[in-house]
Amino acid sequence: MFSILFIIVPIFIAAVFVFIIAMIVSPKFKGKMMSREIKAQKYMIEESKEDLKSISDDMAYATKDGVKTTAGAIREGLTKSTVFCKHCGCEIDDDSKFCKKCGKKQ
Ligand SMILES: [Zn+2]
């Protein structure tokens, strides 16, 4: 009974050793293993497509307000242009006639 274990365990250890050496030494073997990994990943993505879609939909819904605020801030930053007051240097809207800080005419 134990004699079988004495044969199997060293063979298993040797196989693992050869596998690790092959992974380190041979780029071709490593590539094959990577390709299998990628295939497995693709399969998993294909299998969980519906769940992933549902998660991304939920996340989009949950972050909707934040995205809206950010988009609004970006739009404001792009459209609203400012100039500096000739008298005090304070930043004011480019269409304002008087400075909001010193009150002098622009
Ligand atoms: Zn001013």
Image (spheres, grey):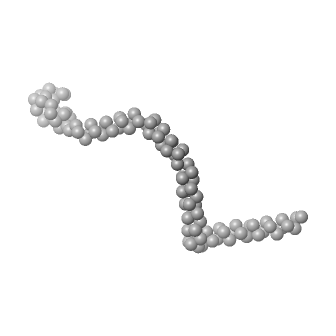
Between residues 98 and 14, which one lies in front from this camera angle? 14
**Along the viewing direction, whichever of 16 and 42 lies nearer the viewer:** 42
| Frontmost residue, 87 versus 54 | 54
* Relative image position of residue 100 (x, y in whole percent): 18, 27
- Residue drawn at x 76%, y 69% is 11
- Which of the 4 image quarters holds residue 103? top left
Q: Left or right: 6 with respect to 100? A: right
- Kindly tell me whether residue 89 is visible in this rendering: no
Q: Position of residue 89 (x, y in %)?
A: 17, 35
Count numbered badges in the picture: 0
Determine the residue positioned at 19% across, 34% down.
Answer: 93
Give the answer, above or below, for where 29 lies relative to 95: below
Q: Is residue 39 above or below residue 62?
A: below
Query: Quarter-wise, where is residue 94 in the image?
Result: top left
On-image quarter of the N terminus = bottom right
The image position of residue 82, as x and y in percent, is: 20, 37
Residue 35, relative to residue 61: is it above or below?
below
Q: Residue at x 68, y 71 (%)?
A: 18
